[in-house]
Image (cartoon, grey):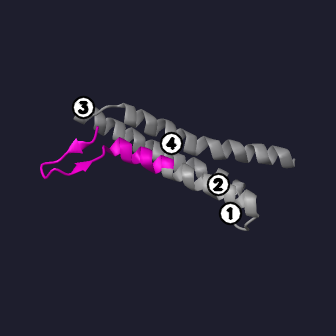
Amino acid sequence: MPITLEMGRRHDTPARRVFYLCVAVMALWLAWGVLYEATGFPGINYLSFGLVSLPCGAVLFLASIIAYAHGSQEDHAKADAVAALLGSVAVALVPFVAMLALIEDYS
């Protein structure tokens, strides 16, 4: 549930913001993968995404842990933080595993 401020404005918890960022990164990578496969558009391929995914997922994982700690101190629901943790693991591992599968196919 969003937190309400004095002025009546509402904002999301930090964990939910990290989760939204994870979803945005996954959507961007999915859109690029579909564009790359459908059109053969030259540029960044799956190997690049596989190598970039690990540090990107690590940064999101660290942000998720910080958001979890913040939520624990503020008595926020921990479901958003757990979803952000799982999303960051997916951001890190799914493109990396796809890259390993591609490398195995080419060898």
The location of residue 37, given as percent across then percent down, is 74, 57
Is residue 63 rendered magenta in the image?
no
Amino acid residing under circle 1: Ile
Quick check: marks 2 and 1 in contact, CB under 8 Å?
yes
Earlier-in-chain disc, 2 versus 1: 1
Report how far apart the C-alphas of labels 2 and 1 lie in the structure.
8 Å
Residue in the foreground of this view, choosing between 6 and 52: 6
Which label is found at residue 49? 2
Residue count near mark 3 (Cα–Cα under 10 Å), binned few <14, some 14–19, many ≥20 = few
Residue designated by label 3: 75
Q: Which mark is residue 13?
A: none
Mark found first going from the N terminus, 1 or 4: 1
Q: Earlier in the sequence, mark 4 or mark 2?
A: 2
Instruction: Report the amino acid beneath label 2.
Output: Phe
Q: Secondary structure at mark 2?
A: helix
Q: Amino acid at mark 4?
A: Ser
Q: Residue furthest right?
A: 107
